[in-house]
Image (cartoon, grey):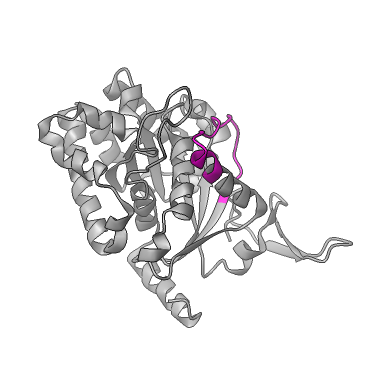
Amino acid sequence: MLCPFCLADVKFKQTKPSGSLASIYLCSDCKEPAPALYVQDYRQYPPVVISATGFRQHGKTVYFAALFYTLKKLSLARDWPDFFTMGLNEDSLDTVYGNVRLLEGGALPDSTPKNFPRPTMIRVDGVPIQPDCTLLFFDTGGECFEKPTQLVQFAGFVRRAKAAMLLVSIPDLEDPRSGMQKLLNTYIVGMRELGGQTEEQDLVVVYTKADQLAARFSPNWDDLRSYLVKGSIEDLVRTKNYIERMHTVSERLLAFTEQELHAHEFVNAAEANFKSVNFSIISALGSGTSDGRLPVAVAPRRILDPLLWGMEKSFSGSERLWQRWLNWLGGTD
């Protein structure tokens, strides 16, 4: 089993501390107690590492906050009949509902400190086409992605992600071509130093703060502006069609990256070093901020796209079939 804390493949030892009514499951390596729900239901809800990689102030922490808000507040279960999410431990519950309260109150989460983070663990059940799983969210300070040595020290979680997620805010880059290439280069070097192989990962490039980026779109990219503006939850009812449209939008964003950003070197390096490369565009808040607060109510746009890419790339076709069979045996399909 994958330990959600040290991310090693381990065995968990069940033990009951003296004076306690509850058993705990200790990792054989790091000795951290893992949630009972995580260990007991591991086969039915295998872990998927969701790691945010990006420079400081490029929207990683706000993206996760808006994603938690979307999962809990925007009535996904109305359109996905079997859908629900659950935090697996007290820290995860505090993180999810704390971020929801912040955004509802017009505030933003604090910037993430530079350290090796503890995961936010969320069980996801009933997403159409996707296997049920436990999402392990990891976020650390953007300074950790300035140099490979910092990535190795504070962001080793990237090695266990099957889909690498690069969050890029074009409006915050003085030279998008250079900035994107530096981030990618740093990631590839750091991964190799960690003993990982980017060639075994799929890359998802996420353009953040798209409400600002869309203002730069020429008429040639009106379809991308329209996709962003109309990014409502209702579009997700027909999930298969939605995934197909994500692929179409990815191709258009690839064209935008080459034709408008002239980031050909970034594209070439990405395609040479990863199994696949896909693009996504999001607005985590729906509008800009003023003095660190939201002037209007939060309205996330296409916020689930990167998560759907991450889930899509984390399971092979055979794993999907196997997972559905397990769920059927357990009466959950």
| Residue 90, position as x, y percentages in the image | 66, 52
Q: Quadrant of the C terminus?
A: bottom left
User: What residue lies at 20% left-to-right and 38% top-to-bottom?
Assistant: 225
Q: Is residue 200 above or below residue 190?
A: below
Residue 5 appears in the rendering: no
Q: Is residue 195 above or below residue 147?
A: below
Measuring from the top left, give residue 286's x and y in whole percent.
35, 38
Is residue 158 rendered magenta in the image? no
Quarter of the image where one finds residue 10:
bottom right
Residue 117 counted in the magenta span:
yes
Place of residue 63 in the rendered image (x, y in percent of width and height, measured from the top left):
43, 40
* Most distant residue in the left direction: 220
Q: Can you say whether 13 is above or below 249 in the image? A: below
Which segment is the magenta one? 100-120
Compare residues 224 and 29 and report the one nearer the observer: 224
Magenta stretch, main secondary structure, is loop
Residue with the most extreme right position: 19
Q: Nearer the viewer, residue 63 or 255?
A: 63
Residue visible at 53% across and 69% down in the picture: 43
Q: Is residue 115 left or right of residue 56?
A: right
Seen in the image, is 261 located left or right of residue 35?
A: left
Q: Split into 4 quadrants, where in the image is the N terminus?
A: bottom right
**Which residue is rendered at x = 88% and y = 61% of the image?**
18
Q: Is residue 122 above or below residue 176?
A: below
Percent across and percent down for residue 126 are 42, 67
